[in-house]
């Protein structure tokens, strides 16, 4: 008890360095990220397999190549942004903002490019078009990921640098969670009104609309993501101390991260909950089309239920996180809630059952969403204490790789499930699936249950058990690290 009480007093007395407006502005990074990223996750695999009719194996192979590219691209970008000292650092004292400003527009435009498959390329009419469509898929998603990484790693890396206090970090993420949920809601509601399964070009129109809105959301985020005088002064002090500014070679940096048990446990736990949440998003159109036998617009109701659960839960997670003051415990509570609420989704076949299940599931999602950045902040503080350096871009680059690997895992799971259960590419309704596979369509429909609920439930419980058993950053460790960071000038 003596360890916990001082921390509670310290949190109450903490003076925030930034206004609520600035913290909300930075939190709107989640609004922009979900507005574009969720639209990508909802529709890309469905677009290529169902709307365009790309062979399921080739769709999986595209995701595999995508994941290999991620294995190099994301950690490398994180390492480069720490290693390279660009001219703007010395001239203006900024480190992250120019990267962010340069690459936000290419990232947004590349999102449109993903859906711009030439209309005459129809693999269902002429199977020889499978390869050109496959090539377009690979090229466009890799380009999208490269620009996204260059932008997002630098925005993420600013979080532990600019917002230092535990209370301030939780407040920032409280805003981020609510705004991120809003972004998900908008991504689920707006594009489906434009998209038409019989007209592939409507997906381009929806993407264009997303990008235009996304640019204005970026402007909303700028004040919070701007490097202020205090942050620039920290950069200057660090540059003048060679022992804190030296960056190890790329391969050695990766080796250091992989051998860091605390970081890897955090990264793997992040992988589990991210894949679980994203797999429902990626499976959503399959659920509405083949399990519920309705239009994609019904997915708005389902996702709305999940996000309502998450939104309602955020104030509770914020309250209990301050009361419990243990990021590990709070993360575990959220993870277990996700696992339990996955179980009904394996069997339910009506929209009411799915809506109730997803409403409850949203509570766990809200908790994980809220707790992830503060927990990552604990890990990065711990790394800084043990290494004497703050080089979070490298670690965020690796975590970004973990997210993209999650997307590849999702693509692999969906593709293999469809291949093994007799799903027919190009079938745009349950009736078409029944006509194309009259003796095995029930198994194909259950395959949607497998990749939307069963597989993610198993993944979540595995990562929860490992995180509970081996992750050991306790409130006492967090408190000691804060003291050591002050002593080290970090």
Image (cartoon, rainbow, N blue to C red):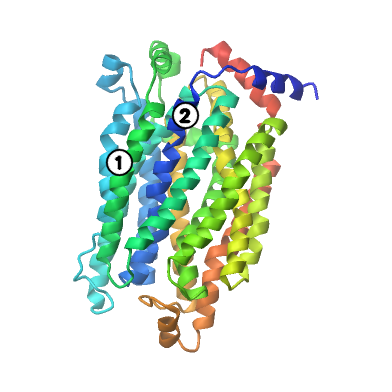
Label 2 sits on residue: 159
| Residue 405 visible to an observer of this rendering | no
At 38% from the left and 51% from the top, the residue drawn is 68
* SS label for mark 1: helix
Q: In the image, which disc is placed on residue 120?
A: none
| Residue 463 visible to an observer of this rendering | yes
Q: Position of residue 56 (x, y in %)?
A: 38, 70
> How many marks are shown on the rendered structure?
2
Q: Is residue 192 above or below residue 187?
A: below
The residue carrying pointer 2 sits among few (fewer than 14), some (14 to 19) or many (20 or more) residues within 10 Å by Cα, namely many
Q: Position of residue 124 (x, y in %)?
A: 28, 78
Q: Please state which of residues 297 and 65 is positioned toward the viewer in this rendering.
A: 297
At 40% from the left and 33% from the top, the residue drawn is 155
| Label 1 vs label 2, nearer the camera | 1
At 38% from the left and 62% from the top, the residue drawn is 192
Q: In the image, which disc is placed on residue 215?
A: 1
Left or right: residue 60 compared with residue 380? left
């Amino acid at each position: 008890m003596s360890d916990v009480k001082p921390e509670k007093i310290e949190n109450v007395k903490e003076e925030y360095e930034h206004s609520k407006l600035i913290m909300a502005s930075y939190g709107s990074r989640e609004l922009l990220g979900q507005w574009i990223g969720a639209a990508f996750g909802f529709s890309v695999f469905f677009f290529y397999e169902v709307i365009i009719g790309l062979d399921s194996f080739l769709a999986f192979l595209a995701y595999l190549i995508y994941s290999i590219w991620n294995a190099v691209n994301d950690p490398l970008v994180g390492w480069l942004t720490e290693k390279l000292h660009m001219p703007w650092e010395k001239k203006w004292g900024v480190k992250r903002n120019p990267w962010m400003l340069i690459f936000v527009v290419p990232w947004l435009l590349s999102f449109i490019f993903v859906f711009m498959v030439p209309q005459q390329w129809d693999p269902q009419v002429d199977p020889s078009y499978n390869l050109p469509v496959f090539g377009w898929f690979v090229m466009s998603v890799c380009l999208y990921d490269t620009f996204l990484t260059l932008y997002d790693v630098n925005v993420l890396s600013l979080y532990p640098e600019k917002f230092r206090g535990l209370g301030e970090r939780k407040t920032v993420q409280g805003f981020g969670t609510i705004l991120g949920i809003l972004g998900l809601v908008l991504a689920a509601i707006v594009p489906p009104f434009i998209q038409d399964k019989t007209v592939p070009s409507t997906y381009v129109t929806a993407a264009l609309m997303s990008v235009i809105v996304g640019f204005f959301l970026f402007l909303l985020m700028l004040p919070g993501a701007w490097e202020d005088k205090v942050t620039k002064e920290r950069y200057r002090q660090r540059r003048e101390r060679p022992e804190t500014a030296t960056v190890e070679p790329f391969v050695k940096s990766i080796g250091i991260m992989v051998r860091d048990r605390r970081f890897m446990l955090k990264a793997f736990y992040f992988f589990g909950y991210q894949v679980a949440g994203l797999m429902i998003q990626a499976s959503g159109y399959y659920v509405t089309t083949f399990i519920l036998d309705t239009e994609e617009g019904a997915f708005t109701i389902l996702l709305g239920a999940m996000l309502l659960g998450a939104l309602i839960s955020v104030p509770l997670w914020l309250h209990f996180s301050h009361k419990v003051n243990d990021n590990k415990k709070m993360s575990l509570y959220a993870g277990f809630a996700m696992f339990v609420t996955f179980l009904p989704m394996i069997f339910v076949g009506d929209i009411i059952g799915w809506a109730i299940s997803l409403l409850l599931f949203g509570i766990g999602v809200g908790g994980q969403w809220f707790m992830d950045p503060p927990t990552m902040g604990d890990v990065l503080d711990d790394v800084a204490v043990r290494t004497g350096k703050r080089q979070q871009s490298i670690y965020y680059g690796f975590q970004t790789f973990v997210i993209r690997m999650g997307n590849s895992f999702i693509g692999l799971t969906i593709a293999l499930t469809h291949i093994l259960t007799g799903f027919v590419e190009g079938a745009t309704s349950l009736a078409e699936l029944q006509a194309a596979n009259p003796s095995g369509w029930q198994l194909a429909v259950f395959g949607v249950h497998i990749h939307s609920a069963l597989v993610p439930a198993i993944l979540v419980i595995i990562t929860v058990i490992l995180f509970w058993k081996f992750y050991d950053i306790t409130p006492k460790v967090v408190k000691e690290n804060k003291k050591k960071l002050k002593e080290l000038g970090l």
